[in-house]
Image (tube, grey):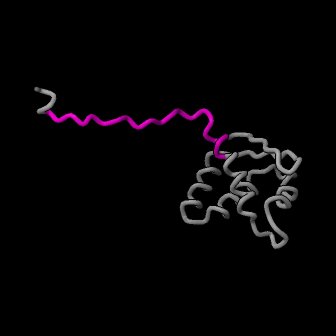
Amino acid sequence: MKVIVLAIAAAEFTFKVSNADYNKFVDTMAAGKPTQAGFNLLTKTVAQEQRASLLEVIADEERQPKALVVMNLVGEISEEMGDGLPDVVKLQKSTATSADETA
């Protein structure tokens, strides 16, 4: 579990994000609902006592997510979730054929 603190609109919000939380976010995004996935991740992982304040920042009067705000915050969380992971680099495949190698 990662504890991530983000400053939003002059307030600090603490998010506790587990791999299961983040995996559910990715799965929902893959289903074609990125804003809802991000909104759910933020509201489910923020410290409970900060939830009402967070909703004032990330949702409008009808409680609809503000996509740009939600996705910016999720981008910050995604960066933090990736910290400490090993780098993945695709290795270039050899283009030499066996005839070239024996010549």
The span picked out in magenta is 78-98
Q: Residue at x 79, y 44 (%)?
A: 6
Relative to 44, residue 90 above or below:
above
The furthest residue to the bottom:
62
For the N terminus, the image quarter is: top right
The furthest residue to the top:
103
For the C terminus, the image quarter is: top left
Q: In the depicted view, which residue is nearer to us: 85 or 94? A: 94
Residue 60 percent location from the top left of the image: 82, 68
Q: Residue at x 56, y 58 (%)?
A: 27
Within the magenta stretch, is there residue 85? yes
Q: Main secondary structure of the magenta part?
A: loop
Q: Residue at x 11, y 33 (%)?
A: 99
Q: How many labels does the image show?
A: 0
Q: Residue at x 71, y 52 (%)?
A: 72
In the displayed structure image, the side of residue 61 where residue 38 appears, left or right = left
Residue 67 percent location from the top left of the image: 71, 62
Relative to 24, residue 14 above or below:
above
